[in-house]
Image: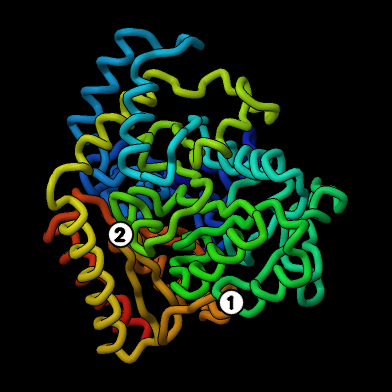
Amino acid sequence: MTSNNDTLFARAQAVIPGGVNSPVRAFRSVGGTPRFITRGEGPFVWDADGKRYVDYIGSWGPLILGHSHPAVTSAVQAAVARGLSFGMPTEGEIEIAEIVCQLVPSMERVRFTSSGTEAAMTAIRLARGATGRALIVKFEGCYHGHADALLVKAGSGLLTHGNPSSAGVPPEVTQHTLVLDYNNTEQLEDAFRTHGDRIAAVMVEPVAGNMNLVPGDARFLQTMRALCSKHGAILVFDEVMSGFRVALGGAQSLYGIVPDVTVLGKVIGGGLPVAALGGKREVMEHLSPLGAVYQAGTLSGNPVAVASGLATLAEIRKPGFYEKLGATTADFAARLSAAATSAGVPFCAAAVGGMFGLFASPTPPANYAEVMQADKPLFNRFFHMMLEAGVHFAPSAYEAGFVSAAHDAAAIDYTIDAAARAFAALKS
C-alpha cells in the first residue's frame, strides 16, 4: 500500500524544487521520504498516514512550549480577529521590544524582522556601517542564514579569505569574509594580529546548533570579546537558536559576556515568523531612520506574529520554567548516552538548556572538523529505526534537537525505550 507521505512527496517534487521549501526537510542526508505533518499537539506530531511521532524538531527550535499551546493559540486567534497586517506601528511591537530589552540587557535598542536570515544580514550591514570597515569574521560550522556574505566556507590556508559555499554567490562578495575554526582561540588571536584594524565584526553562535550542538568554549568567547573591544570591532552573538532556548537571558547570560549586537529568532515568535537584532544604543542608532544603514520590512512586527511571541515570552518567564526544561533535557541526553554505552554502540548525546545533540561518536565534538568525523551511516540507521518506532529526530547528523516543556516523563521514557531497542539492534 502506498504511503500518503510518498504520494504527497511525489506531488511536491512536481511543483517545488526538491519537494521542500527548506533543504534539510528533504531527507537527502538520511535517505527516504519526509513525513508530511498534518497536526501537532504537545510533544507530538501526526503525519499524513495518521502515525504519531514524539517530535524533537519543534519547528527547529521555536516551539519551546510544545505544539498548539493553549495560551499561544488563543493569543493568535484574538490577534487574527483584529487584523492580519497593517504595515503601520502597533502597541504590541513596543511591548515585545520592552520585554526583550529587559530580558537581554545587552539589547538597549531592538529592531524586529521576519526571519533570522534577515536579522543576521542586517547585523552585518550595521556593523560595517558603524565601523566603516568591511571584513567579517565567522566560524566554520556556524550558520547565520543564507545571505550571500555568510554562505562561506574556509579558505585554503590559515587566515585566508573564505570561498562561497553556494552556487550563485560571487567570490567578490566573500572576499570580505574570513572563516576561522570554532573554539580555536589561538587562531582567533592570529586573525586579529593580522587584520585587527580591518575587522568590522565577529559573528558567532555562542552555542552552535547548525553543526549539531557544539557549545562555545568559555576562553574562546571571552577572548573574542576582549579582542573586539581592543580593536574596535563589533561582537555579534547569533542567538537565533540559543536565545531563550538555553536560558532566559540566552547563552550570553550563561557565559557572562556582553555582545555589541545580538540576533534573535525562533522562540521570540513562538512558531510564527519573528526575528530581531538589538544591541548598544550607539550602534543601533546607525539604523534608518536615525542613521544611514538602511533596513526595512513590510511584515516586520506583524501583529499576529507579535501576539504569538508575547504569549510565548509570558509562559517562559514563569518561575522555574528553565530549571525544569534544562533538567529534563540534561536527563534525556544522559539516558540516551547511557543506553548507547550499555549496548556498546559509539553514540552519545549532550545538552545545553533545552537544546541537545546526538552524535554517532564516543564523545561530543568541539568543532566542525570533529563533527565531520562522526559515523554518519550509523546515525542514519539509528534515525530510521527511531522514525519507525514513532520518534522524529532531525533528519541530519548535523542538526541540534529540541526538547519542549510539553515533553513529559511518558514521552521521554518512550523515546529512551525505543533508543535502547535501536542501539541493541545496531550492535547485533
Q: Considering the numbered disc 1 on the image, is that residue within a helix, a strand or a loop?
A: helix
Q: Residues within 10 Å of mark 2 (few under 14, many from 20)?
A: many
Q: Secondary structure at mark 2?
A: strand
* Image position, residue 92 (x, y; %): 34, 19
Percent of width and height locating residue 358? 39, 71
- Depth check, front residue: 423 or 246: 246
Identify whether 234 is placed above or below 288. Answer: below
Number of numbered labels in the structure image: 2
Picture layout, residue 278 above or below residue 165: above
Q: Residue 392, can we see it?
A: no
Q: Quadrant of the C terminus?
A: bottom left
Mark 1 surroundings: few (<14), some (14-19) or many (≥20) residues within 10 A: some
Q: Which residue is label 1 attached to?
A: 185
Residue drawn at point x = 16 percent, y = 58 percent: 324
The residue shown at (36%, 45%) is: 104
Amino acid type shown at disc 2: Val
The circle on residue 296 is none
Does residue 172 sit above or below 294 in this rendering? below
**Residue found 47% across the figure and 60% down from its top:** 209
Task: Name the residue rendered at 45%, 32% in the picture.
Answer: 273
Specify the label residue 391 is tagged with: 2
Amino acid at dot 1:
Thr
